[in-house]
Image (cartoon, rainbow, N blue to C red):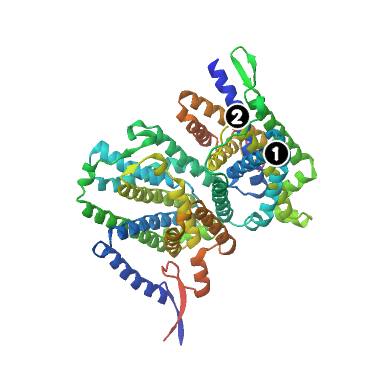
Amino acid sequence: MSAQMITRATTASRIALGAALVIIAILIAAPWWGSTANLRLITEFMFYLALASMWNLLAGYAGLLSVGQHAYVGLGGYVLFSVVLFLGINPLLAIPVAGVVGAVMSLPVAWLVFRLKGPYFAIGTWVVADVFRLAFAQMTSVGGGSGLSLPTQAMKSIGSKSEREMLIYLLALAVCLGAVVLIYLLLRSRIGLALTAIRDNDVASSSLGIDIGRIKLLTYVVTAGVTSMVGTLIFLTKLRIYPDAAFSMNDWTVFVLLIVVVGGIGTIEGPILGTLLYFLLREYLSDLGAIYLMILGILSIVIMLWAPKGIWGLVVKRWEMSLFPVGYRIRKRQD
Amino acid sequence: MEWINVISQGVLIGGLYALFAAGLSLIFGVMRLVNIAHGDLIVGAAYLAYTIVGATGLNPLVSLILVVPLMGLIGYALQMALLNRVIGGDILSPLIVTFGLSIIIQNGLLTGFTADSHKLSAGSLDTGSMAILPGLDIGYMPLLTFGAAVAIIAGLQYLFYHTGLGRAFRAVSDDGEIAQIMGLENRKVFGWAMALSMTVVAVAGVLLALRSNFDPFIGPSRLLFGFEAVIIGGLGNLWGTLAGGVILGVAQGIGAKIDPGYQILAGHLAFLIILAVKPRGLFPRIDG
């Protein structure tokens, strides 16, 4: 006698959960085993993974192909410098402030750019990010085009150099894990079901009563808030900010977008795999300069032509596995 | 009089922006593709002209005899070999592929020509001007640019609505499957559309290079200007696009007059204001 049962977890996902807990434990312990260089590299990895996961939520699930997310990274950075210089409060408090500022700022932006459809939406977000860059370059209170430095006094208020590095590392880890877990839980919720339906077919999902406009707006606002918080952390490690670095399209949008597309868009695993791959490529090829960037360009075209679901898509096709079970599957149960 | 000068300069540069926009709009109209590499292709055309002028000593305007067909050929090849394979499905693939193309062109130009900026010269035309009113001089070069924009847009308009090729463009745009049943080979029609777009890009690139300095990385902002002109004017309306270019040019001119740092920002703001009050642009096509 056999009956059907519905499960979410798979063998692979149970193993993955175990492995993930081990990896997270090792990462939390990194300040005790890693060198400063190690910590810096992992911190940067966490930033990119958080940005990539957020862009994936936006583009891969909500279908909002924004190429202007560097607007929020830069905004988060400037929130940090403004809070420290004008309010004189602890730099770490800038992180939640940036989350709120990013989310609030994203509302008028969404009101404007949501009028543009499809690919024109993408370029519209690009224009908005350019407006942010040019506007901050005109503001003399934040140093105009040449920017600002964080006073050492403010940094010392966090702690000694090694304490600071450890704290920033742990915060980066927390924000990154938080971003991934947020997406995982979001996708398993009702909103996630709606997002998955929108990803698969927005017309059909709308006819089933999903309020696409609201879900998209919600996703855009959440993504903007988290992206701004990551921006604050990024510039907490850089200690200096100027408009071209804060709103760098290459650093905060193009590389992030390539990570997601190469790893596998529309899956939680894709950005993780993509970030690993990006750091590997960068480690070995970035000395090539312009040639390295051309290789990245060619890679993105090759992926789109032959594996539009990215490398994780190939893995899924070959072994049918899912490390983050967000869907349902039916299995036969032996009684 | 100073302000009249600013505005007339803005109007004339608007012609160049309309040329950036016309190629973009043409491609979007026929195959719903937004070519992120459009600006980089404009810069690529400028470098092609620079190379030809360097090798032959031709006047840049005469070099168009070579640049225009070469860019057309590149466009056709690009469409047949690459872009045809990614259009028709979701909007992600064409966006990423043209993004990749943009990175490749920029860094390819950087590798081939260094980051130095260049400018083309058409001899005495560069600085020549005529006095329209006392105190109001119009340069020959801006006037020529604007004239070229009007002529090209009139030509595209005629081609779209009065020739067999234009009929094919409209047919595949309205309903690709029916067009195919009626005996059109969509792939080739798309190839022709991209070729045509690239001939406009060729003219735009040479006029850009005659007017101001160019380097491998100025492409993206030209894409944004063209895009803004398209949206301000209204999707699918070529004459509207010219008006959009003019509005953008005037806005930038006024911004630059207030403070040089406000030039691009003023253009962006004009675009955003029009997006806020007239989301479909000032002159949207009635159908569509």
Q: Is residue A47 above or below residue A131?
A: below
Image quadrant where residue B80 sits: bottom right
Q: The N terminus of chain B lies in which quarter of the figure? A: top right
Please give the chain letter of the residue carrying mark 2.
Answer: B
Q: Which residue occupies 42% across, 41% down?
A: A244
Query: Which residue is denoted by mark 1 in the rendering?
Result: B56
Between A83 and B274, the residue placed more toward the observer is: A83
- Residue A27, position as x, y percentages in the image: 30, 64
Instruction: From the viewer's perspective, tell me whether residue A325 is left or right of residue A201.
Output: left
Q: CA distance from mark 1 to mark 2?
A: 29 Å
Tag 2 secondary structure: helix
Image quadrant where residue B19 sits: top right
Instruction: From the viewer's perspective, tell me whether residue A233 is left or right of residue A128.
Output: left
- Residue A226, position as x, y percentages in the image: 36, 51
Point out which mark residue A143 bears: none
- Residue B2, position as x, y percentages in the image: 53, 17
Query: Which residue type carries mark 1?
Result: Thr
Q: The C terminus of chain B lies in which quarter of the figure? A: top right
Instruction: From the viewer's perspective, tell me whether residue A62 is left or right of residue A99.
Output: right
Counting residues from the start of the chain, the first of labels 1 and 2 encountered is 2
Looking at the image, can residue A10 be seen?
A: no
- Residue A227, position as x, y percentages in the image: 38, 50
Point out which mark residue B13 bears: 2
Looking at the image, can residue A144 be seen?
A: yes
Between A335 and A117, the residue placed more toward the observer is: A117
Q: Which residue occupies 57% across, 29% down?
A: B249
Please give the chain letter of the residue carrying mark 1.
Answer: B
Instruction: From the viewer's perspective, tell me whether residue A246 is left or right of residue A24.
Output: right
Query: Which residue type carries mark 2?
Result: Ile
Between B206 and A213, the residue placed more toward the observer is: B206
Image quadrant where residue B184 sits: bottom right
Tag 1 secondary structure: helix
